[in-house]
Image: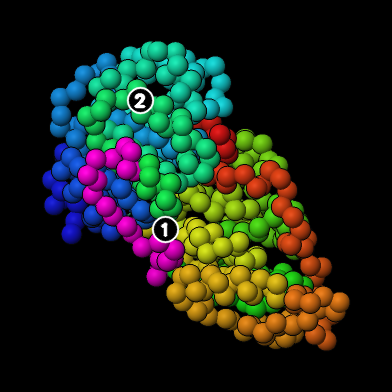
Amino acid sequence: MDFSSFNFHPSLQESIDLAGYKKPTPIQEKAIPIILEGRDLIACAQTGTGKTAAFLLPVLNKLLQEDHKDSEVHALIMVPTRELAVQISSHLDGLTYFSSISSIAVYGGGDGGSFVREKQALSNGVDIVVATPGKLISHLNMGYVKMKELKYLILDEADRMLDMGFHDDIMRIISHLPEKRQTLLFSATMPPKILQLSKTILKDPGEISIALSKPPETIKQSAYVVYDTQKMGVIQHVLAEQPYTSVLIFCSKKQTVKQLTAQLQKKGYKAKDIHSDLDQTQREDVLLEFASKRLPILVATDILSRGIDIDQIELVINYDVPPDGEDYVHRIGRTARAETKGTAITLINPDDQFKFQRIEKLIGKTVEKAALPASLGEGPVYGQREKKEGSKKTFSSQPKGKKSSAAPIANDRKPAPVASNGPRPKIAIIKKGTENNLPLSE
Ligand code: AMP
């Protein structure tokens, strides 16, 4: 199947060609016909599947083919975070490049100037609004938002919106919208509260589920079973094997990110870190440096594991095993975006073995365990618990009979700082030349 079978408006087809999309992804193949038919939709799909274009393309096509007043808002896309709002907005800019469809991103944290711009667009009319619920409510409360003729409502990452406590805001916003509209709900997971919401706001929806928790086959996954003191040696070994130009290393804790980056820099690698201690401008600068391939190694917390959209990350290294299977899929999904190939390597210390076995179960695959380079000594045995002196159920974290070559980096078992317990924010990469503000969370 290719995009021509949808018979999209020529200007839209032109932007699809410009974006380099050759054929629809599975979610697009399933969702686009339902949306074009005018039906409501509930879709279970994660980021990385092409879900954004799955709703943008048919909605744009409808807007291009229908008569509509310039003085109204015609489509509303509600999202949990400002990062996702910015990311969708930049996606929209690309897909509307050859048409006159207008759009605006409305999210919290901007300056006075952005409020005035948003107010102007919402009161004078704009085709598509991409908004976080809280900020949109502030505008709705002022009474000038033109949404009486709205035709399309899209809830993206609905599960995260509910997790972040936006249920009542969403319902309040919906109370301002016409009853007769097409509603599309996208969610990475389908917990009961999402099904409940869908019953309230969707009418006879089409249902789609794109297999969850399975990393793309194009990612070559492997793992090293190590002691903490061997991790740095493995990273050096991996980086020496191939001249990677774009490597993303994930650590579960901010402290580990900082320490690992310092160690890498000390060893002469061009590496930088990104985490919540950096301010907005610093994060943006690092991300752009990495996205433009001027920075080969980026060390990050899970803040980047969802939603980051950078082309051609060749290698993802999990310095530690992520908390659960979903995180693992999200982390390694940063490589092999949209049908390119990628490599993902996970370092499993004895404490993380059980977690990794659970992940293997979830993804339905036994990840290949690579042999440690001889210079690092023997690693632990996989799947076999070892007793730490004085403790009952933990594992030893030192190689037997081998002196440590590097100090182990901060114990990942330390409790997470309070700030990282909240909902994980998303990062959007802003294409070069755009000047949007890119805070990390609402
Ligand atoms: P998403 O799941 O919406 O975050 O999309 C993930 C990535 O896939 C984005 O970089 C999109 O630009 C890209 N993408 C979306 N649709 C297609 C397609 N049909 N072919 C190739 N890449 C696509």
Neighbourhood count class around disc 2 (C-alpha, 10 Å): few under 14, some 14–19, many 20 upward: few
The percent coordinates of residue 347 (x first, y second) are 64, 71
Quarter of the image for the C terminus: give it: top right
**Looking at the image, which is closer to me, 182 or 119?**
182
Residue matched to label 2: 175
Say which residue appears at 62% left-offset and 35% top-offset: 281
The percent coordinates of residue 334 (x first, y second) are 49, 57
Q: Is residue 432 above or below residue 266?
A: above
Say which residue appears at 43% left-offset and 46% top-offset: 193
Say which residue appears at 71% left-offset and 45% top-offset: 418
The percent coordinates of residue 412 (x first, y second) are 73, 62
Say which residue appears at 23% left-offset and 54% top-offset: 30
Neighbourhood count class around disc 1 (C-alpha, 10 Å): few under 14, some 14–19, many 20 upward: many
Which mark identifies residue 408?
Answer: none
Q: Main secondary structure of the magenta part?
A: loop
The percent coordinates of residue 274 (x first, y second) are 64, 48
Which mark identifies residue 337?
Answer: 1
For marks 1 and 2 on the same chain, the one whose residue lies earlier in the sequence: 2
Q: Which residues are magenta?
A: 198-218
